[in-house]
Image: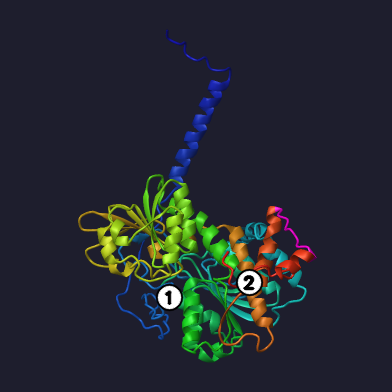
Amino acid sequence: MSMPDAMPLPGVGEELKQAKEIEDAEKYSFMATVTKAPKKQIQFADDMQEFTKFPTKTGRRSLSRSISQSSTDSYSSAASYTDSSDDEVSPRDKQQTNSKGSSNFCVKNIKQAEFGRREIEIAEQDMSALISLRKRAQGEKPLAGAKIVGCTHITAQTAVLIETLCALGAQCRWSACNIYSTQNEVAAALAEAGVAVFAWKGESEDDFWWCIDRCVNMDGWQANMILDDGGDLTHWVYKKYPNVFKKIRGIVEESVTGVHRLYQLSKAGKLCVPAMNVNDSVTKQKFDNLYCCRESILDGLKRTTDVMFGGKQVVVCGYGEVGKGCCAALKALGAIVYITEIDPICALQACMDGFRVVKLNEVIRQVDVVITCTGNKNVVTREHLDRMKNSCIVCNMGHSNTEIDVTSLRTPELTWERVRSQVDHVIWPDGKRVVLLAEGRLLNLSCSTVPTFVLSITATTQALALIELYNAPEGRYKQDVYLLPKKMDEYVASLHLPSFDAHLTELTDDQAKYLGLNKNGPFKPNYYRY
């Protein structure tokens, strides 16, 4: 029995017709106004420039390699593809001033400052602990007289940290630790607020080192504190400005790569200032490395590739805190996850968490996604890349871009094709394609964002470390690398508990005596593994 046609409700048919006409008119109007952005052919130089030679203005387009194995340590896309940017003028060639008449900065476009300010204000809403620290301490100005030179990712969250340091009395000059992670509008907002910031998204390698040098090298201003992420700033000051380096009162470093460099300097007897290893503080390791990467790995992969993870085979190189976070997220979405590890303890943890531990060679032909997070170099080599299946996705979650041997892909027989921002197809002669994300650089901050709340934890830790080193009496810290005091780690955590309406249980006097603890902490010994 056939059903009668549905009768339209009175008036609805006419409304739908009018809506369709409006929609069509808007669509054709929009299509008529869209123009294709002019394409810019990126040129690359073959010559290599030594780290100690400062790039000149005429030579800054050549892409130099650093002997320090820095976070820019690969040629910045030496293949032939076009870029969709509609602004071909380098910020270094622009004459810009903020509303106060100052030109002591170099950003993409100072006119984006208002938009950047809104981004910073949004970030402040989820960084209540850092704002609380700012309000508690700004009357005392614990960083009065501090001249901090910083090299970190320049995002809205980092801007909240920079402005907190300024509110606590510090003078700051800032550059970016990654050529792709800078939020241009945020850099503009900082410049408008009077911070000497030198950074923009898409810097060349020469631009990268030029920005760092502009932060350090200024007449009448000499840094006495360093806040670094990756060690490039510390290495630059150590190599190029040894007299400045000797007068630094303290270094705060937050990455595996940078901490490794500090320990190398200390072991060689060349570290002449105290340094604070923030990376291995509990609040950084567990929250920034583990919980942050657990969320941001998926964000970065989804935005760039639109991949569905259910049933996909993924190999994660490294099962440290970053690797653990990545694996937990991938497993939850139904991916089949393999682990590579050099450490038997981490390997055993992976096995107990239900993952199969393999050598990369054993699975490289079958996996759909390869993720590196070891902090090492040449984890994924050209041999591995040659053996990958068609459309395999390759990316890095470590700080430095040394983990994937991208340089080996800059050969005449391979074709590079930019398919969208931060996504390259590297095409082999037989037609096979490997999908390379962010040219092997840090995926989450290059291709997406990271949770603001987690960055609040890291930023608060960094601020307290700077305050501690700057105000420490002479002799407390020698020329060595130190962990953040346990009491400060616990203080950072306590500042963030109100966000969850969490209520700590307090020890009674009898309980504290039984455990041999102070009622106010610290509650765990330094050797305790959380």
Relative to 408, is 70 on the left or the right? Answer: right
* Stretch in magenta: 501-509
Q: Secondary structure at mark 2?
A: loop
Q: Is residue 247 visible?
A: yes
Residue 89 image position (x, y, % from top left):
44, 68
* First along the sequence among labels 1 and 2: 1
Q: Residue furthest top?
A: 1
Q: Is residue 99 visible?
A: no
Residue shown at 46% from the left, 82% from the top: 264
Q: Would residue 364 be counted in the magenta stretch?
A: no
Can you tell which quarter of the image residue 362 is in?
bottom left
Viewer-nearest of discs 1 and 2 = 2
**Residue that carries the numbered disc 2 in the rendered image:** 525
Q: Amino acid at mark 1?
A: Ser
Q: Nearer the viewer, residue 136 or 505?
A: 505
Q: Is residue 362 above or below residue 271?
A: above
> Residue 70: which numbered mark, if any?
1
